[in-house]
Image (cartoon, rainbow, N blue to C red):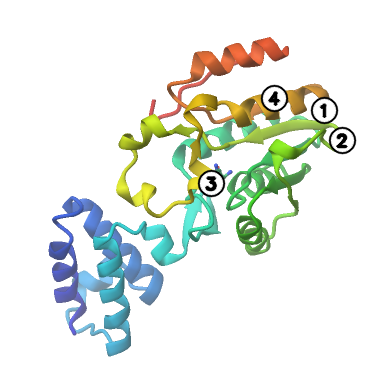
């Protein structure tokens, strides 16, 4: 089948689910990732044809998109902080807000020696690997409770030629951290059940709930545990970095103050 014609068909089939720009982005991404075709190729070469296998593959992607499977899982990878990461349903898809967190760390530490870093709940490894690549003299460790996530993170470190030590570890069962760190960072689960209605189907039905949700009655469980462990093992000039729940900023700050943290800085990300 003619690819240019198929592209129109693909976009129109998705109009009930996505706006036209989103739908066009999806097909452009798939054409580029699977067939190496640039938009200009498709626009200027009407003779381009799919093989039957290619057509079947695109049809299957179309079906999945109608079910709102995230495009990143269909492609199997995504971009984050200038690097490419494998993603699959065992790991959260790296978010733009988290890139801002990584950038904050990199800006704070780029001229600041060779920091020892720990990323807690590393998922795809996006934070640990991006920081390791960007702070070349750093030493980075990362932990996660999910075996499948950790295996994904390890593959991502290989793919990006990053040196990160990975450990399978449940932070809630951890009594103390093994040594001193200059940077402890985490983007732990923080969505409460009462916020579930705000979460789109593509997230709710396909991304790992282990990575997203916490008990309504103890939404800061990960933050408190990490903060308690970190205060014992941060170096003198060390810092703890968190991505937080937008509705729980004052509770999070109060909890940190009670544990003994000083000079707490709260930043709004680009999504507010
Ligand atoms: N650290 C990973 C990320 O920021 C995973 C976070 C998570 O699963 N809660 O994407």
Lower position in the chain sequence, tag 3 or tag 4 = 3
Q: Is residue 249 visible?
A: yes
Mark positioned earlier in the residue sequence (1 or 2): 2
- Earlier along the polypeptide chain: callout 2 or callout 3? 2
Badge number at residue 227 = 4
- Distance between the Cα atoms at labels 4 and 1? 10 Å
- Residue at image point 38% right, 30% down: 194
Q: On the image, which quarter does residue 264 sit in?
A: top right
Real-space Cα separation, disc 1 to disc 3, in angstroms: 26 Å
Label 1 with label 2: CB-CB less than 8 Å = yes
Q: Secondary structure at mark 3?
A: helix
Horizontally, residue 3 falls left or right of residue 36, namely left
Q: Give the Cα distance between marks 1 and 2.
A: 6 Å
> Nearer the viewer's eye, disc 2 or disc 4?
4
Residue 178 coordinates in the image, percent (x, y): 86, 38
Q: Secondary structure at mark 1?
A: helix
Decide if ligand 1 comes within 8 Å of the CB at mark 3. yes
Q: Which disc, if any, is residue 233?
A: 1
Q: Are marks 1 and 3 in contact (CB under 8 Å)?
A: no
For the residue with label 2, is its CB less than 8 Å from the closest atom of ligand 1? no
* Gap between marks 2 and 4 measured at Cα: 15 Å
The disc placed on residue 264 is none
* Nearer-N-terminus badge (1/3): 3
User: Which residue corresponds to mark 2?
Assistant: 179
Where does the C terminus fall, quadrant-wise? top left
CA–CA distance in space, label 2 to label 3: 27 Å
The crowding category of the residue bearing disc 4, from other C-alpha atoms within 10 Å (few below 14, some 14 to 19, many at least 20), is many
Indicate the position of residue 177 as horizontal and vertical percent values. Answer: 82, 35
| Residue 81 can be seen, yes or no | no
* Residue farthest right in this picture: 179
Q: Which residue is mark 3?
A: 210
């Amino acid at each position: 089948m003619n690819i240019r014609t198929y592209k129109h068909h693909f976009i129109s089939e998705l109009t009930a689910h996505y706006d036209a720009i989103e739908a066009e982005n999806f097909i452009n991404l798939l054409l580029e990732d699977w067939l190496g075709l640039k938009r200009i190729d498709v626009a200027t070469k009407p003779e381009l044809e799919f093989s039957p296998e290619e057509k079947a593959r695109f049809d299957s992607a179309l079906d999945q998109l109608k079910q709102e499977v995230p495009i990143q899982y269909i492609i199997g990878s995504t971009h984050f902080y200038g690097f490419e990461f494998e993603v699959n349903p065992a790991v959260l898809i790296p978010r733009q807000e988290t890139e801002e967190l990584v950038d904050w760390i990199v800006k704070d530490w780029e001229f600041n020696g060779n920091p020892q870093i720990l990323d807690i709940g590393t998922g795809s490894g996006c934070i640990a690997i991006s920081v390791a690549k960007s702070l070349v003299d750093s030493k980075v460790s990362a932990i996660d409770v999910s075996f499948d996530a950790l295996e994904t993170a390890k593959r991502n470190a290989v793919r990006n030629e990053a040196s990160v030590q990975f450990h399978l570890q449940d932070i809630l069962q951890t009594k103390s951290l093994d040594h001193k760190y200059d940077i402890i960072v985490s983007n732990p689960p923080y969505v409460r059940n009462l916020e579930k209605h705000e979460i789109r189907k593509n997230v709710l039905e396909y991304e790992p709930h282990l990575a997203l949700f916490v008990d309504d009655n103890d939404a800061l469980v990960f933050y408190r545990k990490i903060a308690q462990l970190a205060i014992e093992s941060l170096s003198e000039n060390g810092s703890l970095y968190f991505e937080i729940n937008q509705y729980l900023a004052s509770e999070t700050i109060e909890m940190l103050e009670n544990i003994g943290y000083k000079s707490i800085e709260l930043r709004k990300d680009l999504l507010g």
